[in-house]
Image: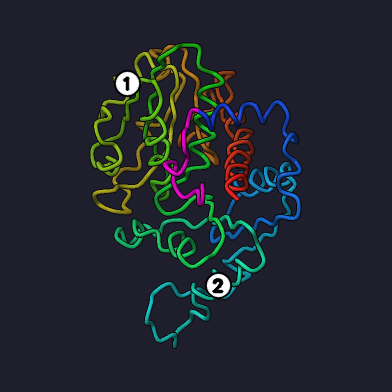
Amino acid sequence: MKHYLTLNDLPNLETAVAEAIALKKDPFQFEKIGKNKTLGMLFFNPSLRTRLSTQKAAQQLGIHTMIMNFSNEAWALEFEDGTQMSGLRSEHIKEAAAVVSQYCDIVAIRAFASLTDKESDEAEKVMHNFAKYASIPVVNMESATAHPLQALADAITIKEHSIKKRPKIALTWAPHPKALPHAVANSFTRMAQQLDADFVIAQPEGYELNPEITKNTPLFHNQEEALEGADFVYAKNWCSYADYGKILRTDDAWMLTAEKLKNTNNAKFMHCLPVRRNIVVADDVLDNPNSLVIEQANNRTFSAQVVLKKILENG
């Protein structure tokens, strides 16, 4: 595995999940594989779980880490070719990626969507240009359209807590006061489509995800109908894709509550965090023993660890 830019870069999802679960039992069993290796972590946006879990994952493999917050510590980067750089951008991605490659053996990057230009966001300019101009592997710590480390952690969590051979998994849109990207929902969808599961998505009209990603996944505009009989319920906000970047509704009708989970199969609740209590999901769901949000956060370490391990094994 050269890069980890999307979930599709994994040779086999099921195998990766099994490896991650094995790593949890003995996190330091491969601590020599990263000896004298350095992971550079570049953040264009804020992070809690991603930063700490990826750093911990690296350390458990014996990898040194260096961290830079690009938003306030680095030169503004230019990503366009042939540009006369007379404006605010001081360094071109060609030099920046090449320089990072001199200091690091792997670079992990976090760069959110702008939500103002669909074409630009879907081009994934930050991630793809680093992959193009760096001479080292690139790991996606969340980009404009994908969050594959989160999706792998979610797959691990579902595997650990599933008591049925073929569970029902429901991804439901939930309200939020800000316009949020599609990255988590996109990657969760791609992951769930690969599982032996009944997977459905619920969203209000106008909030349908990119149809190239949802494909044949059943879509519901009725949240209660979608959640019926579910074994896992994953709540997440995202902005409109068709009316790109827009918030189409602000009411709380789609907030997830314990009442809405009564017709599920005693469903486990999932969310990537951070979450706004009593906006996205009610306290009575988050504080319930069926909430897996902390387990998901813990599994972020092992999703990152198995990815870094596979990259190092590839040489």
Image quadrant assignment for residue 175: top left
Q: Toward the viewer: 165 or 73? A: 165
Secondary structure at numbered mark 1: helix
Q: Tag 1: residue type?
A: Glu
Q: Position of residue 296 (x, y in %)?
A: 57, 32
Inter-mark Cα distance, 1 to 2: 49 Å
Query: Residue at (69%, 57%) from the top-left corner?
Result: 38
Q: Toward the viewer: 192 or 209? A: 192
Q: Is residue 59 magenta?
A: no
Q: Which residue is mark 2?
A: 96
Query: Residue at (38%, 13%) from the top-left corner?
Result: 263
Work out whether 138 lies above or below 270: below
How many other residues sit within 10 Å of disc 2, few (<14), some (14-19) or many (≥20)?
some
Decide whether the magenta segment is chiefly helix, strand or loop: loop
Work out whether 45 lies above or below 237: below
Work out whether 52 lies above or below 251: below
Query: Residue at (45%, 84%) from the top-left corner?
Result: 87
Image quadrant assignment for residue 255: top left
Q: Which residue is mark 1?
A: 224
How many other residues sit within 10 Å of disc 1, few (<14), some (14-19) or many (≥20)?
some
Q: Is residue 11 magenta?
A: yes
Q: Which residues are magenta?
A: 1-14
Q: Position of residue 99 (x, y in %)?
A: 60, 72
